[in-house]
Amino acid sequence: MRRIHSDFLLNAVIVTGASPHRTLNGTYHTFQSHGTTSAGAGAATIKIQVSNVSTPTEDGHWIEAGDVSLTLGTTRTASGFALNAAWRWVRANVTAISGTNATVSVLIGT
């Protein structure tokens, strides 16, 4: 039986921006994003980006592997996808977030 390990790429962030990049080991990965607001509705867009550049230092070094759009509310909403590819690096990039005290998190499963 294969054990799944998960870890945060981003945890309860409130602003747009990219996570630090990390090494992808292996080829099978899952990405789960979730978020909430403290009142009313909101929204968030998170792009999972990958790179094979030896030291990615600028946005042009990254390509989009997938994206997640969340409609946020006071009850946690979540979405995600699986990736079957051997990239060197990965990062999560929150490109939009709105709503009263909106927060989003991204987990990677390996």
Image (spheres, rainbow, N blue to C red):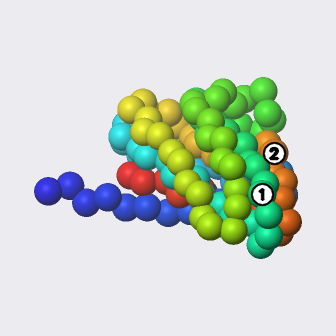
Amino acid type, mark 1: Ala
Left or right: 47 with respect to 30? right
The secondary structure type at the circle numbered 1 is strand
Give neighbour class at mark 2: few <14, some 14-19, many 20+ (Cα, 10 Å).
some
Residue at mark 2: 96
* Cα distance between the residues tagged 1 and 2: 14 Å
Amino acid type, mark 2: Ala
For marks 1 and 2, the one nearer the N-term is: 1
Residue 41 tag number: 1
Q: Find residue 40 and report its image quarter.
A: bottom right
Left or right: 80 with respect to 50? left
Q: Can residue 53 be seen in this view?
A: no
Position of residue 19 measured from the top left corner of the image (x, y, whole percent): 71, 53
Position of residue 52 measured from the top left corner of the image (x, y, whole percent): 58, 30
Position of residue 108 measured from the top left corner of the image (x, y, whole percent): 49, 53
Residue lying at the far front in this picture: please name it: 40
Residue that appears at 36% across and 40% down: 28
